[in-house]
Image (spheres, helix red, strand yellow):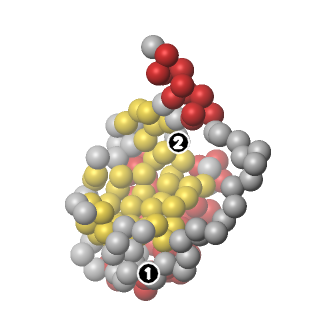
Amino acid sequence: MYNNELHKTNLNDITKKTFRQAIFLCYKGGITSIAPLGFSGDEILLFGSTQPRKSIVSIRNYCGNAELLITDTEGKFLFYGRYCIDLGIENILNQYWKIFNLVKEKIETKVIKASDFKNIKISDNCALTIGFDMLREYQKK
């Protein structure tokens, strides 16, 4: 679910204060979604469109940590990540503000793909994640 309370129509209207408010708001809203690998709250949409997903700047509570998503006009992830909330809100705020300013000029553009990575070899001993074990167990029921 999306929370548009802090949504801006101009990237220049997003301030460090806006980011601080979004971090607090993502926790205030509580948990709104539970999945096999975690839980999350509403996505605090600071900028962009969700249908289709394009030029997004959003923050959400994912498994207790503030998670930042920034996409280009095609919905391609320019940044997706989170910091442990135990590092402190000020530290997270400062890092997210730096990241936002680093990619800000690309948010309203189509970022050209550098590679399709078609020539990457998958190693012979490539492991599957625990998620596949969970799916297998679920299928048995």
Q: Nearer the viewer, mark 1 or mark 2?
A: 1
- Residue 67: mark in rendering: none
Graded by Cα atoms within 10 Å as few (under 14), some (14 to 19) or many (20 or more), the crowding at tag 1 reads: some
Seen at 46% across and 67% down, the residue is 77
Q: Are marks 1 and 2 in contact (CB under 8 Å)?
A: no
Q: Quadrant of residue 106?
A: bottom left
Q: Is residue 136 shown to the viewer in this render?
A: yes
Q: Which residue is mark 1?
A: 111
Task: Note whether 134 is above or below 10 in the view shown.
Answer: above
The front one of 100 and 74 is 74
The quadrant in which the C terminus is found is top left
Left or right: 67 in relation to 117 = left
Amino acid on which the number 2 mark rests in the picture = Gly
Task: Give the SS element for disc 1.
Answer: loop
The CA distance from mark 1 to mark 2 is 31 Å
Q: Quadrant of residue 74?
A: bottom left
Seen at 37% across and 36% down, the residue is 33
Amino acid on which the number 1 mark rests in the picture = Val
Q: Which residue is mark 2?
A: 64
Seen at 59% across and 69% down, the residue is 117
Task: Note whether 12 is above or below 30 in the view shown.
Answer: below
